[in-house]
Image: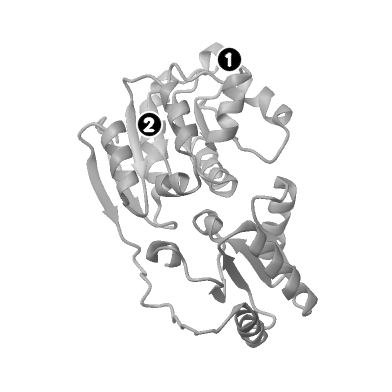
Amino acid sequence: VLAGQDVMGSAQTGTGKTASFVLPILQNILPLASSSTSPARHPVRALVLAPTRELAVQVADNAALYAKHTPIRTAVVFGGMDMKVQTPIVRAGVELLIATPGRLLDHIEQGNVNLNQVQYLVLDEADRMLDMGFQTELDSVIAKAPLKRQTLLFSATYPDSIAALSARLLSKPVHIKVEEQHGNNSIEQKFFQVNDNRDRMNALRLLLLKYQGQSSIVFCTTKRETQEVADLLTSYGFSVLALHGDLDQKDRDQALVKFANGSACVLVATDVAARGLDISSVDAVFNYQLAHDADTHT
């Protein structure tokens, strides 16, 4: 990244990927940093696109920490909350902007954000963005950024759609693959065959009883299923929190805080959120449905 090359990276969550692109970007734009209060002196020079609010916030928190002792301004914009809260922040000027595609387009349409000075474009979890149907939004955002830029694309999987996207956006990219040091060999994995959804829920209930009082995450494939499973487990007496895209951002944030501090033992979440969660000391993870691909499972 420091050498100015496009990069196509493969890395799972937790491998330090955020630092690998934020730190060199900060290093490269630092000579252009300004202590002026004028928004014109703080144009968006680097844009990071992420598929979910949780991942965007996680990247933004790290970016703010890395840039803390510099004049470089960082900010994050995402859906699920009133744009009026975000508008003054981005209008005041920000050099490093982290965003979900849809909300970024909202700000662009409102004239709050201009991308004509973007030098660095990062697509984080690009495969997940395509899985979530962000292709049109991605194309719209990218079309508003300068053609002369450095592009970094990170993806845990490489389906044909990612290959096509990288061929279109990246120029002679360096390919880098990082494996998790601990791997999955240290994690005990078990498979349970069930006959139907009733059996599936009964199996989950019995397994959660085994982990009663411990920290457990249950991943589901859809928002509706996530809420239904959370409601059923609550009716069985478990201390449960739900996390999915139909909830307000305030409720999502509170769910993560409560689960992290042990106020509730079970978090039921969509598997889309899997890459955006950074929670230590989880005792058990349950994939309620078989994941669509191996990388989502792992």
> Can see residue 193?
yes
Q: Is residue 204 above or below residue 56?
A: below
- Going by the image, does 5 lie left or right of 132? left
Per the image, the residue denoted by label 2 is 27
Secondary structure at numbered mark 1: helix
Secondary structure at numbered mark 2: helix
Q: In this view, does 116 lie above or below 66?
A: above
What amino acid is found at the position of numbered circle 1 in the picture? Pro
Q: How crowded is mark 2: few (under 14 residues within 10 Å), some or many (20 or more)?
A: few
Q: How crowded is mark 1: few (under 14 residues within 10 Å), some or many (20 or more)?
A: few
Per the image, the residue denoted by label 1 is 39
Q: Specify the quadrant that holds the C terminus.
A: bottom left
Q: In this view, does 294 lie above or below 83?
A: below
Where is residue 140? Give x, y as percent.
47, 27
- What number of labels is visible? 2
Q: Residue drawn at (40%, 52%), measured in percent from left and top?
A: 16
What amino acid is found at the position of numbered circle 2 in the picture? Gln
